[in-house]
Image (tube, rainbow, N blue to C red):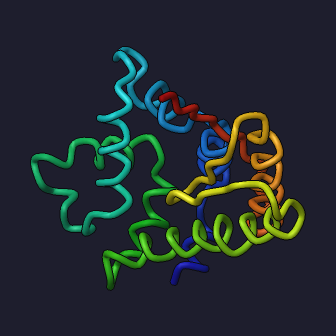
């Protein structure tokens, strides 16, 4: 069923969405596309995405699901694929995405860094790898290469710096 859906969909919606995913600033890009007249609010956009991706399909009709309905309006092809994946089990999309994330960060990138630079301290935190200052570009390169190897996507990563 998913294969039939993918064959029948217009790829332009996917192209636009993938460009945002690859941007390194997904939430901001999505916000500007969906709500061009509103001030960017990362917390609200992230909540909308989490709701859209991980809530039951039936939640669509709930009064608090306005963001989910907005997502479908702006990205009908993406919404349709996600909806099909979650049709019988709402947690399936989450498990697929978590498995991909884990494979890239833990199984591929971290192991490769450990092989290539065994003395470099790294710490995996969900969908990221923390390291020491001046090593962030190396770690980012490994992650982007591993994402490309697995998904054929050219992602731009965001950096987050911690201070004491």
User: Residue lying furthest left in this view?
Assistant: 63
In which image quadrant can residue 137 be found?
Answer: top right
| Residue 121, position as x, y percentages in the image | 70, 55
| Residue 67, position as x, y percentages in the image | 28, 42
Q: Is residue 20 above or below residue 149?
A: above
In which image quadrant can residue 54 be found?
Answer: bottom left
Q: Is residue 70 above or below residue 14?
A: above
Give the residue drawn at x 67%, y 56%: 122
Q: Is residue 152 left or right of residue 11?
A: right
| Residue 65, position as x, y percentages in the image | 20, 49
Give the residue drawn at x 79%, y 67%: 114
Closer-to-camera residue (35/74)? 35
Give the residue drawn at x 44%, y 66%: 82
Q: Is residue 86 left or right of residue 78?
A: left
| Residue 112, position as x, y percentages in the image | 82, 68
Closer-to-camera residue (155/122)? 122
Q: Is residue 122 above or below residue 43?
A: below
Closer-to-camera residue (141/114)? 114
């Amino acid at each position: 069923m998913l294969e039939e859906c993918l064959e029948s969909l217009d790829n332009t919606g996917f192209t636009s969405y993938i460009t945002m995913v690859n941007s390194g600033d997904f939430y901001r890009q999505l916000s500007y596309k969906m709500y061009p007249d509103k001030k960017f609010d990362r917390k609200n956009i992230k909540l909308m995405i989490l709701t859209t991706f991980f809530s039951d399909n039936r939640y669509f009709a709930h009064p608090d699901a306005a963001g989910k309905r907005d997502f479908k309006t702006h990205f009908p092809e993406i919404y349709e694929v996600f909806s099909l994946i979650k049709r019988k089990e709402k947690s399936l999309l989450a498990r697929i995405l978590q498995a991909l994330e884990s494979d890239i960060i833990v199984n591929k990138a971290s192991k490769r860094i450990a092989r290539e630079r065994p003395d470099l301290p790294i710490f995996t935190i969900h969908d990221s790898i923390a390291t020491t200052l001046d090593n962030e570009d190396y770690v980012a390169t490994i992650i982007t290469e591993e994402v490309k190897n697995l998904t054929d996507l050219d992602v731009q990563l965001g950096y987050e710096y911690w201070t004491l």
